[in-house]
Image (cartoon, helix red, strand yellow):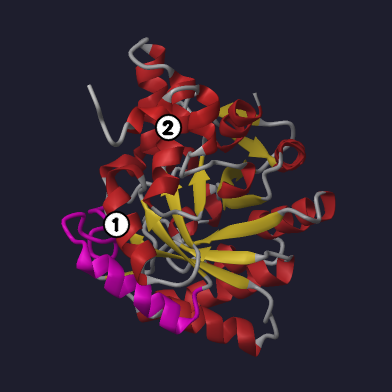
Amino acid sequence: MYLQRRNRILRATPAIRSLVAETILTPNDFIAPLFIDEGEKLKTEIPSMKGYYRMSLDNTIEEVKQLWSLGIKSILLFVKSKDEFKDNTGKEAWNKDGLMQRSIKAIKDAVPGMVIMTDVALDPYSSYGHDGIVKDGEIVNDETVEALVKMSISHAEAGADFVAPSDMMDGRIGAIRQGLEENNFTKVGIMSYSAKYASCFYGPFRDALDSAPGFGDKKTYQMNYTNRQEAIKETLMDIEEGADIVMVKPALSYLDIIREVKNAVDIPVSAYNISGEYAMVKAAAEKGWIDENKAIIEILTSIKRAGADLIATYFAKDAVKLLND
């Protein structure tokens, strides 16, 4: 049998497949999310995120040192606020002595080279569990944006390299950029959650921070998962307002959106491989239905192949160890 082209030649051996691989994962691709709690020597496993922990700051610093030694250069910080600090203003979010602010300073002192990104949203500090200030049962936009600006400036003062607004309020990127500029934080970047969808896959994350909404849902500010063009519109607006990196969240059910955004923009695109996606892999692996290690690398490769330059993932540490092996 004569064939002019035999495509299988380039698949014949592991070495050949490696030579012609189009998508290569490296530690530089990953952002490691970290959950921080008050206290000392605490390491509490999150029930719905097997193998992932909420840690006190001392243990978090040790974790960051390990991540740096593995070649992971960026972390995304989330803090669990005590109930007594929660209200409908979010004022604890810009407390200069708050847990987030202390964590940024301590981590930067311990591992100066680590790129620290910080979550900017009010839900961990809200008595209602929403990403914004509530009035008459509505999450109000403009007053929330004012609070987010204060929060971002506070993080910048503490030493954050990037603030990462995850709230999906209108106009917050431009307002945050203006606030940073006016306060001389001209080197602090913004990684905007530009296309953040109202997803059922966030459940385990809300367990981690005790931040589930106290009423209703988040569909009046997070995006409708039926929409594609809206993601491009939101992303382009964020870039016009001053975003340095844009994000699509979730990742695995939104690979088409990642590619659409990548094709539309000329700045780095990140994607968040979220808690529900992590939990599904863990649960299926525990049942013996899939090979966890193979699933981790395949999923992360698919997210990068779709167009993500950076991937926030709870698998970051495991993935790097697998890649190194």
- Residue at image coords 54%, 52%: 84
Q: Quadrant of the N terminus?
A: top left
Rendering coords of residue 56 (x, y %): 68, 39
Which of these two is toward me, 93 or 188?
Answer: 188
| Camera sees residue 268 | yes
- Residue at image coords 65%, 67%: 155
* First in sequence: mark 1 vs mark 2: 2
The amino acid on which the numbered mark 1 sits, given as a three-letter code, is: Ile
Quadrant in which residue 7 is drawn: top left
Which of these two is toward me, 222 or 96?
Answer: 222
Reading the image, the residue beneath label 2 is: 10
- Residue at image coords 48%, 39%: 21
Which element carries disc 2, helix, strand or loop?
A: helix
Rendering coords of residue 305 (x, y %): 41, 47
On screen, 62 above or below 135?
A: above
The amino acid on which the numbered mark 2 sits, given as a three-letter code, is: Leu
Bounds of the magenta span?
215-243
